[in-house]
Amino acid sequence: MSGNENDRDMVDRCRQGNDEAWRELVDRFSQRVYSVAYHFTLKREDAEELSQEIFLKIFENLHRYDGGFPLIAWIASLSRNLCIDRYRRSKREKSFRFVSDDAVAPMLTSSDDPAADAIRRERTKMLFAALSEIPEDLAEILVLRDLDGLAYEEIGRALELPDGTVKSRLFRARAEVAKKIRERHESRGPGAFASVAIAAGAFV
Amino acid sequence: MSCQELERLFVAGASDLQGRKHAESCPACAAADRDQQSVRRLVAVLRPPVGTPALREALLAVPARTVDCENASLLIAAAMDEEIEAANRQRLAFHLFRCSGCALASGTLGITRELAPPQPAPWLAGRLAASARPAAKAVPRVGWRWLLNPKSAIAFAYAAALIVMLAGFNPADLARKARTEIPMEARSVAGAASVTLADRVGAFGEKALRTGMVFKSRVFGYGRAAISNAVQLVLKSDPPPARNRPSSGQERSAPFKNETDLTVASWKKDLALQENA
C-alpha cells in the first residue's frame, strides 16, 4: 500500500469514528502543525490555540481529502491559511515585531557555553525579526521549507504554486532576510550587534 | 548590475557546488550566495518547538468537540425532530458556530418552523363562513331523526290510519259502538256459539266470513274511492287546453263568418216572425 493509500485509509477510519486512527493522525502530524503554528506566532499559548484550531479544521474537513496527494500537503494547506491570517493580524497590530528571549528559547538547545548560547539566541531573534519584515508570501515559504522542513512538492501543493515558483520565492526570501538583518545592523551602529554579527560571520 | 544566474541555477535544481563555481567568477552572485548560506546556517541550528502533553490530549479530544460537515447534516436533520443526544447537540452547536455553510443550512431549515401562517385577504373569512353555513346546519344522520321530518310524520300518520281502517277499525264505527249497546243478534250468536265446540267453530267461521266480506267491501270501496280521487286529481292537474288563437297571418274570417251567419239567421228569423205577426 502506498503512502497516499495509507493516508486515505487512516482518514477513512477517522471519519468512521475510529479513535485509534485519530490518535495515529495526531501523533504523526501534531508536532509539525505545532511547529508551523509556533514559527508564525512565536507564542506558546497562541501556537497551541492555533494548533487546536487547525486540527478542528482537519477533522471537520476529512471528507474533502481524496488521497490524491500526501496528507501532509493537505494539512499544510489547511494550516497555512489559518497561520497566515494570524500572522497578518499580528503584523497589523504591531508594525515592528519584538522577539523576546522566551519566544526563541523553545527552538534552541542549551549547551555548556553560555556565550555561545547567547549568540545563538540573538541570531535567532534577528532572524525572526527580519522574517516579520519581509512580505508574507516570501516569509511563509521560508518558514515551511527551512524551519519546518517541508518538501518543495508539499509546499507547492499547500500553496498551489509550481515548484519553480516555490524555489524562486525561497531564494528571494533568503536574500530579503539577509538584507533586513544587514540593514538593521547598519542602522543600530557597528557596536550594537558586533559580537552577534561576528558570530554569525556573514552579515558584516 | 545584478546577476540572476545564481537564482536560475537554484530554481533549476543545480547543486550547491555548481552555484558556488559560478559565484567565484561573479561578484554579485558571490554576495547573494553568502546571504543564502548565512540564512541556512541560521535556521540549521534551530530545533522544532515541542508541543506539551496537554496539547496532545486536547488534540485527541477534537472528535468529541465537533463533527465533520457530512455528519453535521445528519445531526441537523435529527435536531429538527429533537432526536439528538445532548453530546451530539453540543458537537453540532460547536460546529455550527465555526462552519458558515452548515450554519446557513441549519438556519434555513429552521426557518420552516418559524414561518408565520400566511394571512388571508380580509374578505375571505366572510366568504368562507357564508359558503360553510349550510354545511354547519347539516345534522349527522341518526336513524330516528327521519320521524321528525314533517313529511315523514304525515306519511306515517296516513299509513297508520290506512292500516287501522283496513283492519276494520273505523274510528267512526268505534265511536258509534261505544255509544250503543251490542245488538241482540250478536248476543244470541255468541251465546249459541258458546254451547258446543262445533257451534264455536261454526260461529267463528261465520264471523270470519262476515269479517272477510266486510273487509272485501271496504277494500273495494276504498279502492274505488282512491281510484276516483286519483282520476279526479289527474284530470284537475291537466293543463288548460291551449286557446286556438290565430296568428297574425292566419285567416280570421272563418270563425266570425259562422257567427255572422248565425246572427243573420236569427235576424231573418225575427223578421219572419214579425212579418207573420
Image: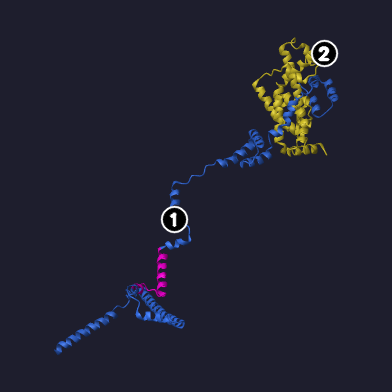
Chain colours: A yellow, B blue
Image spot of residue A107 (x, y percent): 77, 21
Residue A113 image label: 2
- Residue closest to the eye, A34 or B54: B54
Image location of residue B44, percent across then percent down = 81, 21
Instruction: Identify the secondary structure beneath mark 2.
Output: loop
- In the displayed structure image, the side of residue B261 where residue A3 appears, left or right: right
Q: Which residue is mark 1?
A: B137
Q: Amino acid at mark 1?
A: Lys
Q: Position of residue A71 (x, y in %)?
A: 77, 34
Q: Is residue B4 visible?
A: no
Q: Secondary structure at mark 1?
A: helix
User: Closer to the camera, B149 or B261?
Assistant: B149
Q: In whole angstroms, how far apart are the C-alphas of marks 2 and 1? A: 107 Å
Task: Specify the quadrant of the image occupied by residue B241.
Answer: bottom left
Query: Looking at the image, which is closer to me, A35 or A191?
Result: A35
Compared with residue B198, is residue A123 higher up or lower down, i.e. above or below?
above
The image quarter containing residue B45 is: top right
Q: Which residues are magenta?
A: B150-175
